[in-house]
Amino acid sequence: MPTETFESKWSFQGTAREVQCHTLGGGHTASDSLLYLPNERICFVGDLIAIQNHMLVVDGDIHYWISILEKLNQWDIDTIVPGHGPVGGKQWISQAQVYLQHLLDQVNTLKQEGRSTKELSSTVMPEAYQEWSAKELYTKNLQHLGENIS
């Protein structure tokens, strides 16, 4: 059993660095947490960001996830350590936002056109995402959102 927990932020100063643990709410899952090294400007983001990898959206709240990334983009960060993919720069925060918003836009367009959710499986993946890992998640994400977003 844990001896310490936190609701939004927990910090401690070691002999070599300050470490901050944060939660900005649930985006990818209800329990998203971040580990931030402010002096080094490094953020371990878990599955809130995947670099060159499709993110799975079936367990969280995509709208809140996008708002978490907006907040995270305001932090002083140079390096992102993602849950999946290589270490990258801060631009991957925006890239993740663009990807998630793209998924929402695809689903909203389909619904506005009066097309069925089943038609999402034939959606062509944009070239920007074709080289990313976990390609099967693209269609899975669209179908999940189509069935669960009103």
Image (cartoon, rainbow, N blue to C red):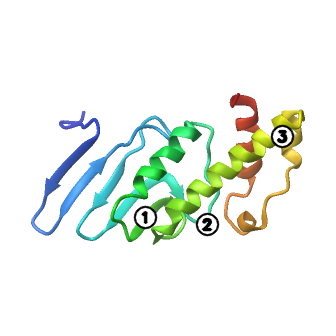
- Does residue 28 appear in this view? no
Name the residue: 36% across, 51% down: 34
What amino acid is found at the position of numbered circle 1 in the picture?
Val
Left of 76 or right of it: where is 81?
right
The image quarter in which residue 57 lies? top right
What amino acid is found at the position of numbered circle 3 in the picture?
Leu
* Residue at numbered disc 3: 110
- The mark closer to the camera, 3 or 2, is 3
Whole-angstrom CA distance, mark 1 to mark 3, is: 34 Å
In the rendered structure, which disc, 3 or 2, sits on the residue that comes first in sequence?
A: 2
* Residue at numbered disc 1: 81
| Image coordinates for residue 75, horizontal then vertical, percent | 35, 59
**Element type at mark 3:** helix
Nearest the eye: 133 or 7: 7
| Image coordinates for residue 96, horizontal then vertical, percent | 57, 57
Seen in the picture, residue 3 relative to 89 is either above or below; the reply is: above
Give the number of the disc on residue 52: 2
